[in-house]
Each structure stands twice: as C-alpha cells, then as structure tokens.
Amino acid sequence: MAADLRTRTSGLSLTLLLLAPAAMVGENGPLDEFLAQYSRIESLHMKASAIVSLETPEGPRVGSVQIEYWESGGRYRLVSRSERGLKLVADTETAFDGESFQLWLRDENILSLARQDSKVPTSAMENPFFLPVQFLRSDGRLGEGALRLADVVRASAVVERPQQGDAELIFGDAYRVVTQTERGKAVPRVIQQRATGSAGHSLIELRDYRPYGPKGLLFPAGISVQVVDPKAGTLRTEILISTLEFDLPLPASTFVIAGDDETRIWNSDLERFEDDSGMPGEPGPGG
C-alpha cells in the first residue's frame, strides 16, 4: 500500500494512490449491492467544488478547486480549475470522443490531440465521483490512472473477497472500508476508507448520501479526504458535489474540446504543431 503525494511539473499535486496486498478472503457482503449501482449508470454529469488545505515543508496553502465531469458510452470530458495560490497543476480540460484524446492546457492555450485515450491524471484532484470506490485499487487491478465507469464495473465483477467484520471490510494488511446500512435501505453506504503504510496514511469519509437520477442511485454529496506523508506533507480536502445527474442524453459535442480562435493545435502522435489548414506545421520543443 502507498499513500502517494505526487509532484507534477507545474507544481505540487497531491494524488491519492491506495495499493494493498491481494490476500483477501471471505465474502464481500454489502459491497456487492453498492458496487452494482455503477453498472446501472448509462451516462453521468457531475459538478463538484472543494476547499484544499496543504501543509508542506515550504509552508501552508489553502484554495479552491472546481471539477466538472461528463461520461457516456466510453466517452468523457473533465474540466479542472484551481486557485493559483495552491500551486497545483494548471487549469486543464481533457476529453475522449471515441476517436481522439484531447487535452487543453488553458493557461498556454494549447490543445493536444492523440488517437489513443490516456489515463494520465491531469486534474488538480481525484475525480470526486470515483472516491467512494478507491478501495478497488487495493489489489492493483485498476492501476494508478484516472478512472472511468467501465473500469469500476470491470473491477467490481472480479474484486477479491475481503475479510468481513460487523461493518468493516479488511483488504490485505492495511486497507479498511467501513460500510453502513440504514434500516429499510437495500443499498449500503461506504462511509469510510482508511489506509496505512510505510509512506503514510490516508482517510476518506463519505456522508450525506442522496438518491440521484431516475433509478434513485445512492451516492454521497459530501466527501472529506486526508492524506499524510511524512516527507511531502499533509493534504486535507473538503468536497461538495453540487450536481449529479444520471442517464440524461449527452450530445456528441459534449465530448469535443473546440478551444478558441487563438488556440494552437498540437498533434501528439506526430509531435508537431498544426497550422491553420490542419496540416503538420512547426515542430515543438526538441523537434
């Protein structure tokens, strides 16, 4: 298991990576019903805001982050904006329309295009929609990249069975997931995920579960995240999901980043900028 406070080239970004040994036995119990919700989602739209507090050797930093996310049929788009004082990654938009991966570096006004999708994290924080299922990373099956609906559905179908107590599921030696089922509720709630290892420890707390969409799927509106690394520092994030919509029709244009009149197009496959005609133009740095 590792709680990783990752530094990216544009500044310090704290990204939660939770990995644990795959020695799991017993029954999944209430998790099966909770995870089954993800397979019932045909499309989603989410808006979330967060207050992020960083305590690092260079001093404290506090600021806000906004995330908006759409996904449908293997296509997605994610918009990430953060206050400059946080010194996290630059503002970005990423999308995949089924044919090309798009990354818009808004500060530089460069739109990068590639044929293959990418799961390299580009946002200032983890996508809040997938925080309730971070424990699925416990056996390494999901890897370290950004999550999509299909990843969660696939991992849910083959997740190893953990040990189970009254309300606590133990993954390996270090990862614990606390669930809660209210009387009369068919679907339980993941309310806490804790991980401890040599690189530090992490805690995710989920609250204010509400029914969303025509199927009444239960997801949290409030999420707290704390990651502590002895060397990199401490991250505390308070997240509010203000919009969560399921199974609405999303037009194809949702997953296309157009940029603006001044946007430069970078062909990532050819590693060159394109001119106004869409033909390869000048090479980029080192080209």
Image (spheres, grey):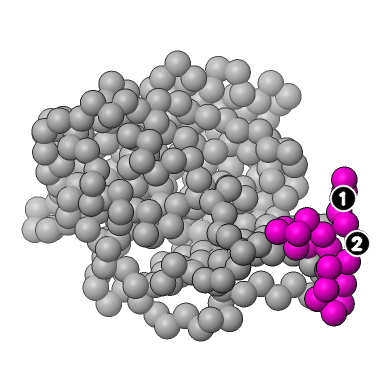
Q: Secondary structure at mark 2?
A: strand
Residue 208 point in image, percent of width and height: 32, 54
Residue 286 lies, with reference to residue 108, above or below; the image says above
Residue 121 lies, with reference to residue 161, above or below; the image says below
* Residue at image location 36% in from the left, 41% down from the top: 141
Q: Which residues are magenta?
A: 266-287
Q: Is residue 279 magenta?
A: yes
* Residue at image location 41% in from the left, 72% down from the top: 73
User: Mark 2 belongs to which amino acid?
Assistant: Glu
Q: Is residue 124 left or right of residue 277?
A: left
Q: Is residue 118 magenta?
A: no
Which is more toward the observer, 235 or 252?
252
Residue 65 lies, with reference to residue 243, above or below; the image says above
Q: Secondary structure at mark 1?
A: loop
Judging by the rendered image, the residue that carries numbered circle 2 is 282
How many other residues sit within 10 Å of disc 1, few (<14), some (14-19) or many (≥20)? few
How many other residues sit within 10 Å of disc 2, few (<14), some (14-19) or many (≥20)? few
Residue 72 lies, with reference to residue 39, above or below; the image says below
Judging by the rendered image, the residue that carries numbered circle 1 is 287
Residue 111 point in image, percent of width and height: 74, 64
User: Mark 1 belongs to which amino acid?
Assistant: Gly
Residue 176 point in image, percent of width and height: 28, 30
**Label annotation for residue 211:** none
Q: Is residue 253 visible?
A: yes
